[in-house]
Image (spheres, coloured by chain):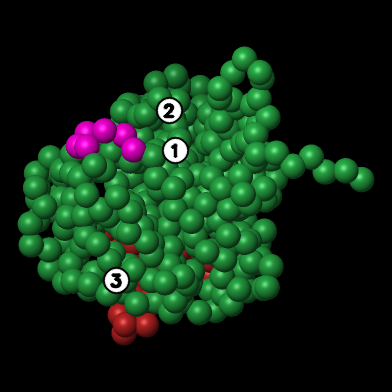
Chain colours: A red, B green
Amino acid sequence: MYQLINNYDGNESRYIKMLSTGILIPKVADNTDYQEYLAWLAEGNEPLPADEP
Amino acid sequence: MSTIKVNRIENTSTTDGGVSIDTDGHVTIDGQQLPTAGPLSNRNLIINGAMTVSQRSTSNAGQTATAYRACDRFQTGIDSLGTWTVSQAASAPAGFSKSLKMECTTANASPSAGSFAAIFYTIEAQDLQLLNYGTANAEVVQLSFWVRSNKTGSASFAVRQRDNSDKLFSKVYNFNSTADTWKKIEIEIPADTAGVINDDNGQGLTLAWWLNSGSNFTGGGATTGWEALDNTKRNPTNAGIGGTVNDYFEITGVQLEIGSKATPFEHESYGQTLAKCQRYFQYFPAGAFGRWNSSTSAELGSSFSVPMRTTPSLSINPNDNVCNIFRVGITTNQCTVSSLNNAYMNPTGGVAALTVSSTASTPNTGDGAAYDPDGDSHVIFCSAEL
């Protein structure tokens, strides 16, 4: 499961978090962790929304 | 112009050494094979082939899933096939001091169809352009490595090339005729005149040493040259390592080079190898400096000593979730990091935001924060692996 992250200003971060490992993953096409996230999304999954500030 | 045609040149008082020229014109000097193609140095396309660099950990017990663990750049592939200890072992053949070891601690004698245990190594695509794949000038390459195992018999090696067309080359080799003995293996990988490898920072070739697998990956026989991917040809002869507790597989001295002959392993200094590895994995830099945003959160920024392949993923060392972040002016303030909250990174560095669950002294918002990892354990991992 993944979760979106917001910056302090409320805008969406350039990173997402994998909750099982705590790994922060950049939304960058050639990062292999992000490629796995995109594959997970393609299976119909959805990340959790970002925590409220 | 004259040509001297001889097979060997040696001293009148010796019976070996000297210069030998084989029937293909390839030259050996005093028993050392000279390269038949490519450069005289920087020949090895494998980083950390001697297994000297192991930044994440030197030993990881209880492993049941695919991940990068001990020796840098080498990924241990495990899927529903037992439990393993993955380590940088001191066991090695003459001329080497380290090896990558997978040792089974919970066996699986009857792997399910999709299960496997293997060692993977992926080469960045832009570093393979000298192979000229996809052209009439495509190069033959030689793979050489040392292996040791408690098992004997045959095992499978495979190479996968995903760009443009997902292609496979696989080969069965005799990895050991005597248990617990190092053996050097040489495998020739044919030129691929059809499969273009993109000139980018993505995956080029993935090498795979198969230890064990279920039926999804075996039974199809080895390929005859490069073929379209067929999963049943990836592990054509299953070594079955991991079918019994204490089964192990050690590997070192991995070298991949262009040409029709394997040459002696190209050793390099630890520092050279470490710098190459850091393109794919490194610690968040020591000395990163920032500020406390509250008594339990801080932001730290720094630059990498080696630019990474791409923007890295960040994680706390899973073997030790303690991280040293100091309140500037307070000498002892070891923090237990509870999470990485956000980051603003690129391949050359950036900022990480952390939450800590305990501090030795309470920092105030706006206090300076400094990052001081304690050796190799209290660190933040930055990963841009392929």
- Specify the label residue B221 is tagged with: 3
Residue at the disc numbered 2: B96
Q: Does dot 2 land on a helix, a strand or a loop?
A: loop
Are the two marked residues, 2 and 1, in contact with CB atoms closer than 8 angstroms? yes
* Chain letter of disc 3 in the image: B
The vertical placement of B270 against B215, above or below, is above
The answer to whether marks 3 and 1 sit on the same chain is yes
Figure label count: 3
Q: Is residue B102 magenta?
A: no
Q: Does dot 3 land on a helix, a strand or a loop?
A: loop
Check disc 1: other Cα within 10 Å, few if <14, some if 14-19, many if 20+. Answer: many
Q: Earlier in the sequence, mark 3 or mark 1?
A: 3
Q: Earlier in the sequence, mark 2 or mark 1?
A: 2
Chain part drawn in magenta: B178-183
Instruction: Report the residue at 56% width, 30% height from top.
Output: B31
In front here: B80 or B353? B80
Residue at the disc numbered 1: B253
Amino acid bearing label 3: Gly
Q: Is residue B318 left or right of residue B349?
A: left
Amino acid bearing label 2: Phe
Picture quadrant of residue B128: bottom right
- Is any part of residue B214 visible from this angle? yes
- The x and y percentages for residue B184 are 39, 40
